[in-house]
Structure formats: C-alpha cells, structure tokens
Image (spheres, rainbow, N blue to C red):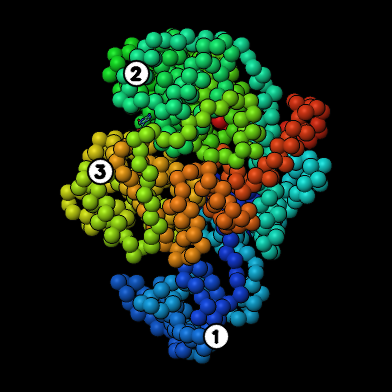
C-alpha cells in the first residue's frame, strides 16, 4: 500500500509528503506531532491573558466588516461580554461575513494580542458553542507542515494510515513493558497522534522516549562490553616542541587546562588506549587542549582526527590549526573533510589521508564515511560530543587499530547520567574560565526595549566590537509569529547607519557562503551577524561582545546558555540581551535564571525544577545526545530504568542469540549502524 492509495492523496500531494520525509504509509505513523492545541474552557474577555492561546465566548455586536488594508482583505468583528469588549480579525477570509452576523454567539480560539490597548484575537478559529463544548480538554495534534500541505490534510492521512496498517511488532520485550507499565507500541502511536487527554499523551510520550533511551542504553552496554582496558598500538611520546608551543602561547593555560593536558599526555604515552572525556563549560578553552593532543600525535608520526558537529565549527578549527602550523613552521599537513566538498576535492583529500600526506584531519562526521581510509589513525577527538548520536567503536575500529579517543563536551549532565554515559571513561574537568574574563552582563527585556538595544549595540560597534543577533526562524512563516533572519536583517539594515555592516547566516545557506560569512565576521568585516542557532556550538569570535536573542522564550535554557557562550571570550566586557516576546510571567521567571547565573549545570537543573517533568510542551533542553523525543533532564528517571533494562537484557545474552524477539534484533542493528561512530 502506497501513499496514493489513501483518500485525498494524489501524486502532487504525495510529493509534498515526500518533502517531509514521508514515503510510506508506515512513515505516516511515525510522523509525530511537534505540539498540540489544547482546547481550554472559554474565558471571559476580562480574564484573557495576552500572549496565551485561549478561547473566549462572545456575542457579536454588529455584522463583521471587510476592509482593504495594504492590498489584503481584512475581516474584523467585535465581541462583548460584561467584562469588556474585544476585536477579532482575519486576513483574506471575506466569506466569514456570511457567518459572523450581529447577535450571533461563537467560541473564538487563538492567541491573545493587544491592539492599541485593547485585547484582540488575530485569525482565531471559530466554533459554535456546542461544537466547542465537545472539544474542551481535548488535544489536537499539530504537525510540522510544508507549503501546500495543511495540518488537516496530514491529520486525515494519518487517521487513514492508522486504519489500514497492521499492528507493529513490539521490539521492547513484554516483561519489560509489563514491569515498567509502558504502553504497547501500537497504543503509543495511536495516543501520540490522537490523545483523548493529557494522561494519554504523557503515556504515549513516555513509551516513545523509552524507545530511544532503551536503544541508547543497549548500545552503551554493548560498547562497554567491548572496551576493557586495552594495550595500545600507539605510544605517543612526549615531544619537546609541545612544551615550547605551550610556553609560546599568547596566554598561560588555566590550571584546569594544564592538568587536562597533563592527563592526556600521560595517557597517550602510557601504553594503554586512552578513553577520556574533557568536560568544561563554554569558553573554558577546550579547543587548545585538543590541538595539543593532535599535534603531539602528529609529531610522533601518526594521524589524528578531530570531529566537530557542524561544518562551521569544523572550518573554524581547521583555519585555527592551519595558522598554528604555519606560524610555527611545523612540517605538518592539515586537511578538512566535510559533506559538502565537491567530488573532485573529496577524492584528492581522501588520497592525502590514505597515503598519510595529511597528518591532522578535521571535519564533520563525514570523517568516518566508508571511503575515508586512514593510513595510521592514532587519535580521535570529538568536539561537542553530546551533539552526536551514541557512540560505538565498531566502524572506527575497522578504520584504525584502536585509536586513542578524547571526547569534549560543555553540556553539564546530571551526575547519575554521567556515570551511565561515561562509566568507561576517565574524566578531566576544566573548572572556571581563563582569568582575563569578565562575567557577562545579562538582561531579560521585552520588545519595547529593542530600540535601546540597537543603540547599545551601535555604541559597542563604535568601540570596535561586534554583535550577534539570534532569530529562531530562517524566513517568514505564516503559521508562526516569530522573528526570522531574512526579514530581520533587511529591517535592521534600515535602522542602523549605513556604515554598519550587517549580514545574515543560517543553515539553509550553501556551505561556501556560510564559511565566507563566518570568515568575514571573524576578520571584522561584518559588525552585526543576524543568525539562527547555527552558531550555537563552538563558534569563537572573541571580539564580539553582544549577544541579542529574539524570541528567547522559544529556546531551552541550556541552549541559551550555549548561545551566550559566543560572547565573553576575551578581556572585553560582554553583554547578553534576551528579548522575551511572550509577555508571560512564567517565561520571564525562567529567563531570569539565566540572567542570574553563569553556571551551566545550575541553569539546567533550575530549568527542570521550574518547569517540572510534567511540562510536556516544554522546550527541549538542548540537542543533547541527539534524541528526538527523550530529554536527558526531563527523562532522567526513565533513562535510569532503560539502562537497567538494557543491562538485564544483555547480561546473559550479549549478542541477543537466545532471544526470539526478531524486532529487537533488527531495531538494535539498525540503530548501531545509523548512529555515529567514535
Ligand atoms: P570552548 O571550551 O568553549 O571550546 P574555546 O576553546 O573555543 O572554548 O576557547 C575560547 C576562547 O578562549 C578562544 O578564543 C581561546 O583562544 C581562548 N583561550 C583559551 N584558553 C585561554 C587561556 N588560558 N587564557 C585566555 N584565553 C584563552
Ligand atoms: Mg568548543
């Protein structure tokens, strides 16, 4: 059965589904909503809260009117109850005139706004009073949509898919499902799409999160089983050039950096395979530590690879290391491997790697694609390790002999989780930031502060500094009232004096364009960079001192903390301005946590405490560990269970030879193949 066998889907619509990554009827089942509309009890006008999505019952004062406004046709109407009066507007829906007649009553559902001091609903949904009464307390799924494919069409397709699909074989063993009171996969799928109430949704989400955590734990347990301390094939002797290099740095290493360097050098030369985690908050200076390890490896005649989660970050590391090598006249060759290289470039670089012309290879996970063959890979560094999927050494083991590994992470993770994750690793911790740093000054403001913020940014630019402005979206989206990089850039170009150079950056740009923009920003040819969160991890432009985040309410605190880490990277005082567009007290309180603390671990814990694990629409904390549903903070307890269960399953049957649960075997194998290597 194919998509076009479903009612309402022709070849054209099928293409639109394909764009969302949906190719089969089964894909539809696994296309989960990213949020839900919750139909709350209607309130009186006086009790509506600006910024919230709410329902109001009201009687129309007069017939709705249609006017022309900037070429658009706007329908407007007024409703009144004893607590007040409010305005309702719709664009391009003149036909509503026929429904919205004086004296009739409806329930209107939408986001409460403000128009010249009066409450408004813009584009509210309209229900008859009876119709709405039936919907109260139900949840309506909202799916990620693409142009031309509405939520209603997706919903209808999923409803049909559910009717025609055969039950799924459940890969979680029944005894576990029973013990942990988990829904079956079939129920979870049904309830995640069509929950009758909050409880349904929570149970469904729990099951889906458990899936991810269980597979993740299985992979971890397997990995641990394979990594008893091993004699190393690579003895990396201490090289004097490293000592001179450290002495000649423009700064002295912090205590944490120096002891991390010592830990690593002693591991590398010690005869056993290194397996070390380097943890340190954003800006603590992890990069230089990894460069030292890579250089020492290369001086010993072996190859080292450094893997970064984004092309931007990989390119940045590459440029930095290349400069180090040329400044010091080291006889080493640095190579950059990313997914977006041209075929001919790739070929040339792969050849350099295979014949060992390249000594240190930097890249994204493209570094470990099948046709990259290393001559003598002795060290693998993974930067921002939590950005990658679970790690397993299988693929890599085949590439090199057993290279030393160093993983670096700024994500503060709860201790229990750290013990699970890193049980087989030694940890070096960089506490604190370099001593030349001043604490970042933070402000949580609302939109009315914008002009002041721009003036402030302009003053910083006049002092020779640079600024980032972060927007959540790339371009305008009718569904979401959020700032976008494209329009924002155009807008502020008009506001700032002509000499101020403003450019945009986002993930949809071509890699070459991105590199070019980052390069120009680094070399101060751009004053203000308007960007999506593509700069969230790792990017290092120490001269920038202002980070302004639009729609800050949309981001997780851990993510905002990472973003903030892009400033405060030099001796200059830095500033962070979080613009909260929500007008909600709760959001203000949440963002205030950031303003009051610079400690990533504290921030993550406070955020969790404030939102509570039950906050289902909560923003995901971070992209940590690449889960799509589970969240390492919110689902701490579930992870603990999943990892106990994984150990239980694998303890007596590590290769799953004795189980007849074929679904589990298939799923785990697929998982191990798809997750990135380390
Ligand atoms: P992160 O730990 O977030 O990866 P980076 O390695 O990018 O941090 O370092 C942040 C900035 O601090 C860089 O510009 C780097 O050159 C600088 N830096 C690193 N170590 C020191 C130090 N000991 N003293 C002063 N600046 C340092
Ligand atoms: Mg970094």
Sooner in the amino-acid sequence: mark 2 or mark 3: 2
Q: Residue at x 46, y 74 (%)?
A: 121
Where is residue 231 shown, x and y percent of the image? Answer: 61, 11
Q: Nearer the viewer, residue 97 or 463?
A: 463
**Circle 1 SS class:** strand
Q: Is residue 84 above or below residue 26?
A: below
Instruction: Name the residue that disc number 2 marks.
Output: 247
Residue 100 appears in view: yes
The residue drawn where x is 46% and y is 84% is: 85
The Cα atoms of the two marked residues, 1 and 2, are separated by 78 Å
Q: Secondary structure at mark 3?
A: loop
Circle 2 packing at 10 Å, graded few (<14), some (14-19), many (20+), is: few
Return the residue nearer the eye: 661 or 545: 545
Q: Position of residue 402 (x, y in %)?
A: 57, 15
CA separation in Å, label 2 and label 3: 29 Å
Q: Give the spatial CA distance, label 1 vs label 3.
A: 57 Å
Q: Which residue is mark 3?
A: 465
| Mark 1 or 3, nearer chain start | 1
Q: Quadrant of the C terminus?
A: top right
* Residue 653, image quadrant: top right
Q: From the viewer's perspective, is the residue at label 2 or at label 3 nearer?
A: 2
- Classify mark 3: residues with Cα within 10 Å, few (<14), some (14-19) or many (20+): many
Q: According to the image, label 1 marks what residue?
A: 105
Q: Under tag 2, what secondary structure?
A: helix
Q: Give the left or right position of residue 143, taking residue 519 as reference.
A: right
Q: Is residue 587 above or below residue 182?
A: below
């Amino acid at each position: 059965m194919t998509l076009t066998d479903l009612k309402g889907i022709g070849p054209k619509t099928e293409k639109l589904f394909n764009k969302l990554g949906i190719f089969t009827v089964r894909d539809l089942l696994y296309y989960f909503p990213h949020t839900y509309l919750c139909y709350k009890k209607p309130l009186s006008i006086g009790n509506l809260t600006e910024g919230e999505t709410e329902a109001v019952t009201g009687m129309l004062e007069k017939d709705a009117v249609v006017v022309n406004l900037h070429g658009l046709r706007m329908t407007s109407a007024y409703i009144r109850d004893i607590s007040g009066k409010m305005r309702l507007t719709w664009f391009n829906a003149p036909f509503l005139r026929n429904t919205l007649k004086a004296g009739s009553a409806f329930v209107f559902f939408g986001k409460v706004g403000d128009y010249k001091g009066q409450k408004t609903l813009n584009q509210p949904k309209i229900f008859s009073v009876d119709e709405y009464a039936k919907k109260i307390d139900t949840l309506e799924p909202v799916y990620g949509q693409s142009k031309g494919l509405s939520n209603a069409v997706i919903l209808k397709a999923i409803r049909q898919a559910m009717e025609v699909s055969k039950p799924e074989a459940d890969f979680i063993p029944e005894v576990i499902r029973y013990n942990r009171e988990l829904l079956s996969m079939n129920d979870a799928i049904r309830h995640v799409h069509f929950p009758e109430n909050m409880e349904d949704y929570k149970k469904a989400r729990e099951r889906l999160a458990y899936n991810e955590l269980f597979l993740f734990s299985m992979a971890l347990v397997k990995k641990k089983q394979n990594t008893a301390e091993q004699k190393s094939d690579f003895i990396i002797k201490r090289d004097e050039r490293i000592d001179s290099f450290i002495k000649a740095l423009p700064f002295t290493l912090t205590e944490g950096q120096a002891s991390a360097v010592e830990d690593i050098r002693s591991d590398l030369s010690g005869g056993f395979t290194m397996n070390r985690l380097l943890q340190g908050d954003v800006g603590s200076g992890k990069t230089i530590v990894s460069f030292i390890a890579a250089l020492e490896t290369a001086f010993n005649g072996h190859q080292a690879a450094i893997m970064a989660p984004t092309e931007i970050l990989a390119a940045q590391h590459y440029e930095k290391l290349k400069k180090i090598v040329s400044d010091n006249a080291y006889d080493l060759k640095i190579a950059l491997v990313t997914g977006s290289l041209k075929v001919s470039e790739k070929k040339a670089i792969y050849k350099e790697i295979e014949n060992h012309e390249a000594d240190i290879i930097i890249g994204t996970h493209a570094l470990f694609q099948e046709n990259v063959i290393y001559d003598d890979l002795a060290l693998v560094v993974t930067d921002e390790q939590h950005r990658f999927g679970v790690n397993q050494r299988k693929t890599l083991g085949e590439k090199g002999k057993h290279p030393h590994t160093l993983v670096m992470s700024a994500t503060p993770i709860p201790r229990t989780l750290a013990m699970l994750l890193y049980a087989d690793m030694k940890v070096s911790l960089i506490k604190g930031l370099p001593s030349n740093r001043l604490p970042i000054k933070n402000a949580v403001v609302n939109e009315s502060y914008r002009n002041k913020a721009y003036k402030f940014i302009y003053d910083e630019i006049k002092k020779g500094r640079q600024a980032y402005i972060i927007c959540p979206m790339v371009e305008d989206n009718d569904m979401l009232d959020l700032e976008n990089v494209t329009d924002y850039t155009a807008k502020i170009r008009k506001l700032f004096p002509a000499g101020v150079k403003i450019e945009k950056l986002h993930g949809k740009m071509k890699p070459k364009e991105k590199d070019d923009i980052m390069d120009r920003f680094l070399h101060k040819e751009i004053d203000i960079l308007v960007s999506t969160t593509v700069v969230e991890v790792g990017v290092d432009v120490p001269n920038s001192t202002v980070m302004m985040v639009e729609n800050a309410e949309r981001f997780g605190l851990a993510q905002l903390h990472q973003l903030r880490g892009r400033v405060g990277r030099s001796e200059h005082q830095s500033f962070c301005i979080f613009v909260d567009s929500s007008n909600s007290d709760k959001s203000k309180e949440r963002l205030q946590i950031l303003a009051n603390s610079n400690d990533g671990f504290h921030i993550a814990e406070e955020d969790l405490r404030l939102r509570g694990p039950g906050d289902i629409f909560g923003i995901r904390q971070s992209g940590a560990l690449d889960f799509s549903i589970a969240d390492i903070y919110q689902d701490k307890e579930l992870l603990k269970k999943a990892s106990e269960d994984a150990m239980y399953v694998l303890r007596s049957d590590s290769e799953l030879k004795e189980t007849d649960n074929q679904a589990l075997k298939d799923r785990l194998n697929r998982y191990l193949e798809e997750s990135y290597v380390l």
